[in-house]
Each structure stands twice: as C-alpha cells, then as structure tokens.
Amino acid sequence: MLALLAGGSSRSSSNNKLAESENAAQNSNNMSWGNELWDQNENLAIHTNRGIDALDKYANFLRDRVAIETEYAGKLRRLVKNYQPKKKEEEDYEFTSMQAFRNVLKEVGDLAGQREVVSESLQLQIIAGVTLLSKTLREERKKCLSDGASLQQNLTTQLSSLDRAKRNYEKAYRDSEKAVDSYKRADMDLNLSRAEVERYKNVMTSKIQQSDDAKNEYANQLQKTNNLQQQHFSMLLPAVLNRLQELDEKRTRGFREFIVGAADVESSVAPIIARCMEGIVKAGESINEKEDTFKVIERYQSGFTPPRDIPFEDLSKCDPDSVQDSHYSNSTSNHLTMRGTMSANKLKKRVGIFNIFGSNKNSLTADGQKEDFSDLPPNQRRKKLQAKIAELQQKIAQETNARDGLMKMKIVYEANSSLGNPMTVEGQLNESEHKLEKLKVDLKKYQGFLEKASQVPVATSSPQANRNQLQNGHRTSRHSNGSADDHHDDGDDQPDDAGSLSSSASPESGLGTSHTSLPGSGQGSANENAIGEDTYYETEVETLNPLGTCKALYPFEASSEGSIPMNEGEELQVIEIDQGDGWTRVRRANNSNGWDEGFVPTSYIECTLYA
C-alpha cells in the first residue's frame, strides 16, 4: 500500500513539474522585453553584451581545447614513433608479447588520428560557427542600441521642447498678470491722464495675447510630447527591445547548438576509439607465454647435450707427481689466458688491423655472421640456413613472375607492334634473367650449406660443458670463449705481445697459413704465409710452443682463408686456444720437414692441454 502511495505521489510530482514547465514556456511566449522591460534599456544592453562575451569565452575555450587536442595527438604520434622497433630489435618482435606491443603502438597511433579528427572538426565546424555568430550578434546589437539611442534622443528633444514651452507660458502668464494689475491700479489712479491709462491698457492687452500664444504653444508641445511618448513606449522602444530579445535568444540557441555539436564531434569518433580499445585488449589477450617460451627455445637451442658425469679420481691409485700435476691443472683451470694468446676484445681489434692483408673467403652477412652460419651452433645454423633458403625461394618466385610478365608483354608487342616496341622489353628481360640466375646460384649454394650442416653429427656436449673434463690424467677441454692453460714447461718466458701477434692469423683476419692462402704453394707453412709481413711477426710465429694436443672429432674441409683441413681422428698440436670466435689454431708436421699451421673449428676437435 505504501509502495502504491509512493508511486502515485512520484507520478503526480512528475506531472506537476511537467505542467509547470509547460506553463512557464507558455508564459514566456506571451512575455516580451518590450512590454515587461520597457524601462530597463541600460540593463538589457549590459545583459546582451555579457551574453556575447560568454559566447566569445566559449569560443576561446574551444580554441584552447583544440590546441590541447592537437598537442595531445602530436605527442601520441611522437610517442609511437619513439617506441617503434629499431632494426636491431626486429628479431625480438617474433614473440607474442612484443607483437602485442607493436599492435598497441598501432592502436595508439589510430587514437592520435581520432584526436586530430576531433581537433579539426571543432576548429572547422564549431569554432568557425561561434566566431561568425558572435560577430553577427555584435553588429545587430550595435544597430539595436543605435536605434534605441536615436529614439531616446527624439523623446528627450521633445521633452525639452515641452519644458521650454511650459516655461515660456509660465513667464507670459506672470507678465500678463502683472500687466492686468498695473492697468487696474492705473485706472483707479485719478492723478494719471487718460493717455497713460490707455497705455497701461494696451500693455495689458499685449501681455494677455502673449500669454494666450504661449499657452497655445505649450498645449501644442504637450500634445506632441504625449503622442511621441506614447508611441515611443508602446511601439518604437518595444520594437527595439524585442529585437534585442531575439538577438539574445539567437545567442542562447546558438550556444546550445554549439555545445551539442561539440559533443556530437566527440561522439562521432567514440566508436572508432572504442574499436581501438578493443584492439588494445585483443593485443593483450593475444600474448601467449607458452608460445614465447617455445620461441625462446627455438632461437637459442644449440643442439648440444648436457655434460656427462665427472669421473671419480682415486688419489690412492695415482703416483704423487700425477696427483700434483692434476691438482695444479684443476687449480688453474679458471685462470687460463694469458701468455701466447689474446683476449676476445684484443682479437676483435686484431682482426680490424690485419684485415687489410687479405680477404676472408667465407664473407660475413650484414649482421656480422658468416655466410654459411658456421659460427653458430648446429641447431641454430640449420634454422638460419632454412630461413635463408625460404627467403631465396620467395625471391625466385617473385622474379619468375616478373620474368613471365615481361615475356608475355614481349609476345604481345611482337604480335602487334602498335602497342609497343619489343626491344624495349628485351633489356628488362635480360636483367630479370640475370637476377633469376644469380638467385638460383645462391639458392643452390645455401642448399649445399644446409646439406653439409645436416650431415655433420651433433656433438654430444657443448664446448662449455666439456671444458673441465679430465681424461687419462690430463685436463681435456673443448674450448670456447677463449680459455686456456698458461702453465707449460717451455712457454713461460715467451712475451705476451708476441703471443698476441701470433693470434692474428685467424680465418676472420684473412691472414692464415692455409694451403689455399698462396696459390701453388701446397700446404703453406708459417714462414711462407708470413711473406710481406713484419719480420718480428714472422719470428714470433715460429717460436710458438704447443699448448697441448687435439683430436679431430669430424672431418673438416678448409673453406676459408687461414684454415687448414683435417681428417677424422687426426692428431694435431694446439698452439693457440679459442679466443671466443669459435676457432682454435693448430699445427701438424708435413712431408717436407716443416709445419702446417692454421685454424679449425673448436667444436670439431677435442683438446688435451698440457698440465
């Protein structure tokens, strides 16, 4: 029951409010400034001026907002530009999280575009309309006020004429009263002559006539003033005030339309902004941590297996000397660099200095990797080669389509010479054939690289894993990242600089002792390779002492300058350990009572360094 009463009271209240609003609207239609505010001309002038100032203020507000919108859009675009992926970061964008971030940047760029649309629409539609309306209203108000001032001036002039006529009438009436009194006194005075009495009578008559004329003039001016005043307050001034009312209503109506229009501008881009937000949410939901984890494995998986267990060393079954040597070898396993070798940083500098003496047959790619990617782990190498082959196949398909199109064009030109000269296509066709042939050669080359990489067995453990393995009482190492034992019997007094210069014959430097480095020289020795180089360098190369021995795990064909071939199971002397570039310098005796020196891949050998 209470609910019904409450509902009924709420409905009646709303109905009352509706009725009140309708009555107010009806009353406002019947009311006008000309009738209700006939005496508030000055206040209405002030009100209309303030109203137009408020319109100008809204226009300034919109201009400031447009400036903010424009600045905001510009800053958003700069933000997106600053966080666009750099060339070196492109490979990281294969992960779903980075792809989502790129999509977020795209959506933010679209948001910036929508803010620019809002700014332009407000500028062209709203601000221009407000400015034009304000200018029009000011001109109309000025004309209304001018007309009102003119009407007021006319009324004031008429009132002044009435006041002047009234004063003249009052003066003439007083003069006539005095003249009548003077004549009466003269007429009663027996001492005055008849002529003098007649003169007073004439003066009285004249003053009475003047008084009557002034009275008539006053009556005439009063009638004119009343007529003008009635016309002024009933017709002329209300017309001006009603024009001011229309002007103010026009301003108010325009104010409403412009505010609604500004909201419509914002609402028009709201669906697109909502789609941008949906795109950002979709980008966030597209992130898949499991997929990213798999891609990390795909990128960095080397193909090596974890290291085997370290064998137990029974010291009771070893002689004291071997125990001491083994202990010393283990104690120095983490302090291996220095003499007879060079650090990785020095190696990079060394390659840059000595590269002018030769060129590397195995050229580098744009990102600093070898052409056949032989410096990568087996698994990564195969993936790189497969990606390169897919890229070449795509280019071949594109170039084949281009060539086929040129051939069809040539056939059409030959069939109808009016369409074109076939010889103009001949040069393009030859160039396309040349590009296609070059791409096919590159494809065959990389397919050979992939076949060779697939034939090489994967090592059972990584170079880092085998670094500290022991075998037959000696320290066995498959070197990587430039570690070596600097303690041996014959090399303690060798200068560091000499050892450093000896490392400059790496395959990357182009200075090697490979049998391919000097045509016709067979398997070149260190002395042959040093021709044309510094004598000091040649002497230091000859005095290198072996750091240990190594055994070839796989066959290796020397494909780069400075490297030497080796057969599986071949024993070689290690004269310089891996400096972090994936190559170890070795030496072996040749049939001419000399030595062959060069570099072999570290992952292809198993080293045993002297204790």
Image (cartoon, rainbow, N blue to C red):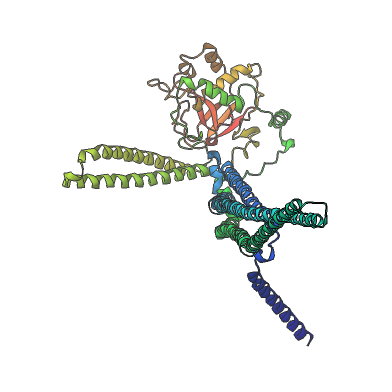
- Say above or below: 603 vs 51: above
Residue 504 pos. (x, y %): 54, 22
Between residue 49 and residue 16, name the one nearer to us.
49
Q: Tell how many labels.
A: 0
Left or right, 430 with respect to 25, comes to: left
Query: Measuring 63% from the left and 47% from the top, which residue is drawn there?
Result: 64
- Quadrant containing the C terminus is top right
- Quadrant containing the N terminus is bottom right
Q: Is residue 36 visible?
A: yes
Query: Measuring 59% from the left and 20% from the top, which residue is drawn there?
Result: 500
Residue 234 pos. (x, y %): 64, 65
Q: Is residue 285 visible?
A: no
- Say above or below: 282 vs 361: below
Between residue 322 and residue 417, name the one nearer to us.
417
Seen as rendered, the residue at the extreme bottom is 1
Seen as rendered, the residue at the extreme top is 535
Between residue 335 and residue 295, name the one nearer to us.
295
Residue 498 pos. (x, y %): 59, 17
Left or right, 413 with respect to 436, comes to: left
Residue 279 pos. (x, y %): 56, 57
Left or right, 1 with respect to 59, comes to: right
- Say above or below: 86 vs 134: above
Between residue 542 and residue 75, name the one nearer to us.
75
The quarter of the picture where residue 255 lies is bottom right
Left or right, 284 with respect to 423, comes to: right
The quarter of the picture where residue 603 lies is top right
